[in-house]
Amino acid sequence: MNKQISENRSQVKWSYREKLGRLIWASVGPLFRYSPRLFWGWRVALLRIFGANIGKHVHIYPSVKIAIPWNVTIGDFSAIGDGVRLYSLGCIAIGASVTISQQAHLCAGSHDYSCPTMPLLKLPISIGDNSWLCADSYIGPSVTIGMGVVVGARAVVVRSLQDNVIAVGNPARVVNVGKPGG
């Protein structure tokens, strides 16, 4: 086997407690995944049991995939749509009144490609209040989305976005700067 691959695989990426927590989360996953769609409170309660910080009146659909719940914060009145993937190796902070549409992917983990052993990086993502991540959008590690931002369908965001902009494309580019509150 390649020496760098061997070194990467031998690195300690998770503590024993994290491994145990992930194992238990995976084992109760069916209670989340197969709950009826309107059981918003049930799914929120399960996430809170596993350390997620979830606000009031949050809607999380049963097909949402959350890697590590204790790395997730979601503000009041936010909605996480069908098939959304919160790959929360690093912390993912989602503000209040945020809509994350179906199949969006928030990826808070990567590898350091500049190092031959490609160590795991657990990098945060932050989504500002009143933002909307449209269908199939991708938000990469270390990205901060400002308040009132619209990320267009299938956009790929790999750099942070300031408040009140609309960004589209791959890679995402700003196409409109809105007025605060409007």
Image: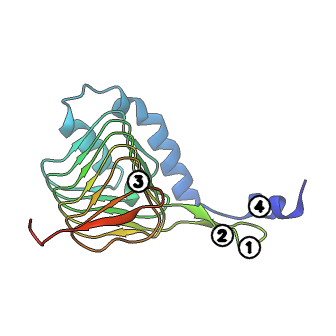
Q: Please state if 3 lies on the left or on the right of 170 as rendered.
A: right
Look at discs 3 and 1 and give the one toward the viewer. 3
Circle 2: residue type: Asp
Look at discs 4 and 3 and give the one toward the viewer. 3
Which type of secondary structure does the marked residue at label 3 adopt? loop
Label 1 neighbour load within 10 Å: few <14, some 14-19, many 20+: few
Which residue has dot 2 on it?
A: 112
Which residue has dot 4 on it?
A: 10
CA distance for labels 3 and 2: 23 Å
CA distance for labels 2 and 1: 6 Å
CA distance for labels 3 and 1: 28 Å
Disc number for residue 115: 1
The reply to whether residue 105 is visible in this rendering is yes
Q: Is residue 133 above or below residue 179?
A: above
Label 3 neighbour load within 10 Å: few <14, some 14-19, many 20+: many
Q: Where is residue 76 in the image (x, y as percent from the top left)?
A: 15, 56
Circle 3: residue type: Ala
Which type of secondary structure does the marked residue at label 1 adopt? loop
Q: Please state if 150 lies on the left or on the right of 158 as rendered.
A: left
Look at discs 4 and 1 and give the one toward the viewer. 1
Which residue has dot 3 on it?
A: 155
Look at discs 2 and 4 and give the one toward the viewer. 2
Query: Which residue appears at 43% of the width and 68% of the height?
Result: 124
Circle 1: residue type: Cys
